[in-house]
Amino acid sequence: MPSLSIRGLTKTFGSFKAVDDFTLEAAPASIHAIIGENGAGKSTVVRCLYGIYRPASGTFLLDGRVVAIRSPRDAMRLGIGMVHQHFMLAPSLSVCENVVLGNEPRRGFRFDRERALTEVRDLMARYDMDVDPLVPVRTLPVGLQQRLEILKLLHRRADVLIFDEPTAVLAPAEVLGLFDIFRTFRDEGKTVIFIAHHLSEVLAVSDRITVMRRGRHMGTMDRPDATPEILTRLMVGRDVIRQELPPSGAASADACGRPVLEVRNLPLFDGGEGVSFDIRRGEILGIAGITGNGQRELETLLIGLRPAPAGRLFLEGEDISRHSVRKRREEGMAFIPEDRIRTGLAALASVSDNALAGSQWEERFRAGPFRKNGAIRRFTRALLAGNGVAATHDAVQAGTLSGGNMQRLVMGRELEHDPKFLLAAQPTRGVDVGGCADIHERLLALRAQGRAIALISADLDEILALSDRIAVLSKGRIASVLSRTEACRDRIGALMLS
Amino acid sequence: MKHSFAREHRDLIIIILSFGFSLVLGGVFIALYGADPLAAYASMIRGALGDGDAVLVTLARAVPIVLATMSIAVAFNGGMWNIGAEGQLFLGAFAAAWVGIDLGFLPGPLLTVLGLALGMGAAMFWAWMPARLSLDKGLNIVVLTIMCNSIAILFTTWLATGPYAGARANSGTTDRIAEAMRLPHFHAFGTLNWGIFIAAAAVLLVALWMIASVAGYEWRCCRMNATFAGYAGIDARSRKMQVMMASAALAGLAGALLVVGDHYRFLTTLSPGYTWTGMILAMMTADRPVAGIAAALIYAVMSSGALEMELATDIPTELVSVIVCCAVLFVTAGVAVADRLANRIRED
Amino acid sequence: MDLLRATLRMAAPLLYAALGGAWTQQTGILNIGQEGAMLLASFFAILGNYHLGGWIAGVACAVAASLAYNLLFGLLCVTLRSNVWVVGMTLNVLADNVVMILMKYFFHTKGGFRDPSIVPMPEVSLSFLPDWLDGLSIAVWGAFAVLAVMLWIDRNTVFGMRLKGAGDNEEALASAGVSPARMRYRTLLVNGVLVGIAGAYLSTSYLLAFVSGMSAGRGWIAVAAVIFGDGRLGWTVVGVFLFGLAQAAGIELQSHGFSSHLTLMLPYLLVIVALVAKQWRLPGRLHAPGRKTPHSGESHTKR
């Protein structure tokens, strides 16, 4: 079983340096964790290792031998396998077919189905997984699908197994099962590299820990030497203390009156029971939950992209359930969508076209039915400057901006409207450390001004840091709403699974 | 500012370069065919612009070509593919002819207006059904409109060789429309007529709308990213239907003008594939209506002179379309490559 | 029975094109250039047949032409990632015009070409065949043979399994080390060969001549059948036969006095009805299992 080394890895996207001279030494038969904030470059590193990205420079060594990895095929041939964040399974093929896909046992052109079944059953027996190999994959729950991904790697006799944020889609109990599997692999002599987001995970299972920040290698240590404080300081550069939220802009309860947003019995999934919640002035309601439990649907329904089949929505007392997106925006709602690139922006359109979105009917931007180009250009420049978006010119395509800049553009544009209510879905995903802090500050500033904010996030730390109240979403319904004092990780974790 | 010039005009540069390459490629084909490329091109220019008469003929040709290009371009602008423009053109033409034949007793100016209006209306109606099926039911609009094309062309052919057949049945021509309805020709030679002003007005209006209006901005957003458009408060469905209707109206107008202004009757051979050419020209110039109009005019010159080229050098007139097609392919590939080089959507 | 025979003759070229198209659809490309490919192939079949002698030469030339056409399509759309719709439509128009030019060059005419020296494709005449099946072109039987082979490949080979996976989730294949680009080229090649045979059948068996525009929308009907079948061979065949029947019925009705123009509309109307009916049967499932096809040419970069 080989040892793995990464030396001097650098990867740039255009002018943005995602990974800067990164080094990693992983010993055989060990569990090696890479940890860092959003945007630190962890995913990029492993993708270079797996051949998805081509680095600008760097060498990979397996057992001291330099190896060239130019595509996933090369990586697989060397015994490196990767379990991605988004599963790459073909839903209508059977479990067995999925596991052997790309590495099928064959007799000439024919697919040797019997041999495939035997091989898969053997693997399952060895690793104590109990799944019917003949059912189509789409019938399996998420946790089992991840096991399938692992089986795929084992079928190819991978010795180095990479896991890209595997716990993001698992409930806390399932995470423990995953860690057991890690230990089994280690005991067999394999090398496990996994990207972690939470300190608790890292401290629970790894042998060695590498910390990344801004694409750089900050430090590597053995598990016994690591403490949460040391790791946090390396990750963030300073100690993060959970702060008391400043007093909100809302005066005490008697001055509140009606909440800003009321949601009543809104079904997220077909035939599901509806969700109901309120958000008051000067309040951040954090909506926590494992991805895939209705967050996207809630986002779509709040924005108004899809008409709600049932249930009601009220904005400051007015029934807006049937209102179009445009009307909702005119009434003071703003939305930062989860998928910035595909929903929040039109990548092929210019930056100024993107900046105008949502405001195109405002008086200041048009003369009758025609656009006032001068006013639009001035507005765009002000927006870019005011939000620190680095774009060479307002006519460049929005897709050429870096992830962080795109995020700032979307956020800045939405906040321009001075909204009464803001929906922020995964606002810091894919943003670097400085940007995260910025965004959090802005959300808190809005809160101080008395706006109502719904914060949907899969990042429990973020939710815990910012929310006044926390609603836990599970299977399309709200399991419970906790106040700030009641909320702690364990309770929320348990609710996520209920 | 230098960067912006390159970026903003990147597409234009690609179009011009592609066109240049295609002309060179065309020259190669001409040589392979056995003629002298320079002589061929020269005779083409001569045939199109050589003398006053030729210019008139070229202009007459330009009218339906520019209308057809604009028709497809406006649809494209909103993200819709109006491949049914040919059928809409024929329906529009026949509708105008019907007005002139069956309602000939009405006063002249009324007839003209009615003819053109009904022509546009018929075309819009014919586009409405596939558009609705595509937008609401998710059906493939390209296949639907192609089918509608064939149906419309067969239908009008049947009308022109059956119930409305003119003096010479089976020739596919109807009777002439009422005198009072006709738009007078400019010259005894050729078919250039007053319709050119109507066409120009329509084209300019649509182009202006596309470039400068808020609606035009919303159309653009619908094309770039429909989800984004919805999120930005744009009613994507209604916008897409709008562009489809505008597109059909222009196609119908093209057909109606051919009847009311050029030929004074409906012919089954009315359109030598005007809208197909319009389509590929529009594809090449995507969301730049001004470039589209320019390309259409250049194409009109080329195809007008092609006949002379064939007479002089035996090169078939179809070469002009081949050159344009090659240009479109170069542009499409060029833009795709340029887009990929520029866009890097980072995932973390 | 006559109608059935006519249906088979009409369905044969559609079947070749649609089967090949179904496979390319699974890899994510709806090949709308089939019309142009078929026309090109028809012309080259006549060209090969006439100049090189014999029906095999004709078929070979036809296949070569449509292969080149599909390779160009592949180069532009798969390797260079251009917009499939633009390229497809442009290639159609290009093929139309190129054929006219070549007609003039080789045969000095632009309308049509027929010649007694053109060797037709052989017909299959076996004693045990009933009247209505007797004497059909070898290409008709070939179509069914191709169908059988393709069904077998789908079920039993690695390629077939990967194709099904590609239809489901292309990323799954890519991450398993199978190049989606390579799969696309492979299916385009198969499609090219099959469309070539279809075109050759048209001009050297169905009609012993080349007439300008002779593909007459068949390529588009094949595309419609592919959409109807949603990448599944079974339903594609159903679509092909429905449309073939409509074509045959149209011609049959002509002999009963209906105007040819109206009866020729039948297959096109049926396509629209079939596509609508298919969508109605799947309410809310805008994109049934299999590759989804864009219904309007949104210009977003395909990755």
Image (spheres, rainbow, N blue to C red):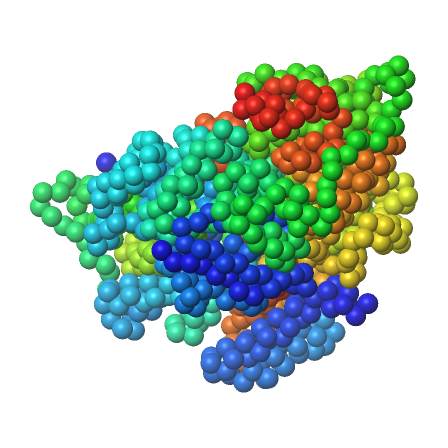
* Quadrant housing the N terminus of chain A: bottom left
- Of residues C195 and A266, the one nearer the viewer is A266
> Number of labelled discs?
0
Give the answer, above or below, for where C43 lies relative to B94.
Answer: below
Can residue A44 be seen here? The reply is yes
User: x%, y% of residue B291?
Assistant: 72, 63
Q: Residue furthest front?
A: A224
- Of residues B206 and A279, the one nearer the viewer is A279
* Quadrant housing the C terminus of chain A: top right
User: x%, y% of residue C15?
Assistant: 33, 47
User: x%, y% of residue B88?
Assistant: 61, 45
Q: Which residue: 48% across, 61% down?
A: A5
Q: Which residue: 45% across, 27% down?
A: C281
Question: A135 left or right of B235?
Answer: left
- Of residues C142 and C255, the one nearer the viewer is C142
Q: Which residue: 41% across, 39% down?
A: A181
Give the answer, above or below, for where A11 lies relative to C255.
Answer: below
Can residue C266 be seen here? The reply is no
Question: A344 left or right of C205?
Answer: right
User: x%, y% of residue C166?
Assistant: 41, 47
